[in-house]
Amino acid sequence: MEKLRILYTRELIKRTVESLAREIRRDYGGHNLILLGVLKGSFIFLADLARALDMPVEIDFVGLSSYGAGTQTSGRIKITHRLHTPIRGRDVLVVEDIVDTGLTTSFLLSHLARKRPSSLKLCTLLDKPSRRRVEVHIDYLGFTVPDKFIVGYGTDWDEKYRHLPDIRIVEGVKL
Ligand code: IMP
Ligand code: MG
């Protein structure tokens, strides 16, 4: 049975999300922003961020999947849930759980850019730069994480542990 060790407590996550929200509100103040969550990993982060933002936003989701079971990215990205909001001429902020190799996020950003939003930025709670394969520009970042497998607060290991309120490291797993 795998062991889970706390990396970031729920209190620290809350303070970090509030500070990201302040930055975003300052940058977009008054604009009619679309928060675009990437399913499934961002669902808890997006829910907390949207409430901390305290400004009018629209919310939509895209579903992307790159992993089969296990901890390695397959490099092949599938759209599992399409975007329903027309984003042409809109300000779009993509909300991700974690940028790891960068393959998923860069695929999504180029897909969205072709729809000609008036601005397109990226907010991710977690960044794992050690395994990057393609460059991704992150506009708003919560935490830079070590080269470990992370679960909780939306992120999963084989669909387990998304519900955990703290962010944890899965110990004894080789990436
Ligand atoms: P990337 O395409 O390698 O950047 O990975 C993108 C997706 O893989 C993320 O949005 C996560 O859903 C998942 N992922 C990557 N690293 C982790 C991790 O440490 N824990 C849980 N999910 C991860
Ligand atoms: Mg994800």
Image (spheres, helix red, strand yellow):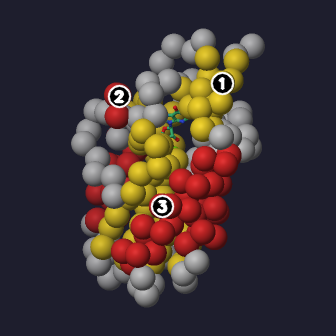
Instruction: Work out which quarter of the rendered image holds the N terminus and state it.
Output: top right
65 to 14, vertically: above or below: above
Residue that appears at 47% across and 38% down: 66
User: Which numbered tag is attached to residue 20?
Assistant: 3
User: For the residue marked with disc 2, what is the amino acid?
Assistant: Arg
Q: Are marks 3 and 2 in contact (CB under 8 Å)?
A: no
Question: Quick check: is the Cβ at mark 2 less than 8 Å away from ligand 1?
Answer: yes
User: For the residue marked with disc 3, what is the amino acid?
Assistant: Leu
Dot 1 or dot 3: first in sequence order is 1
Provide the residue designation for mark 2.
131
Separation of disc 1 and disc 3 at Cα?
Answer: 25 Å
Provide the residue designation for mark 1.
5
Q: Are marks 1 and 3 in contact (CB under 8 Å)?
A: no
Residue 134, horizontal then vertical, whole percent: 26, 39
User: Which numbered tag is attached to residue 36?
Assistant: none
115 to 12, vertically: above or below: below
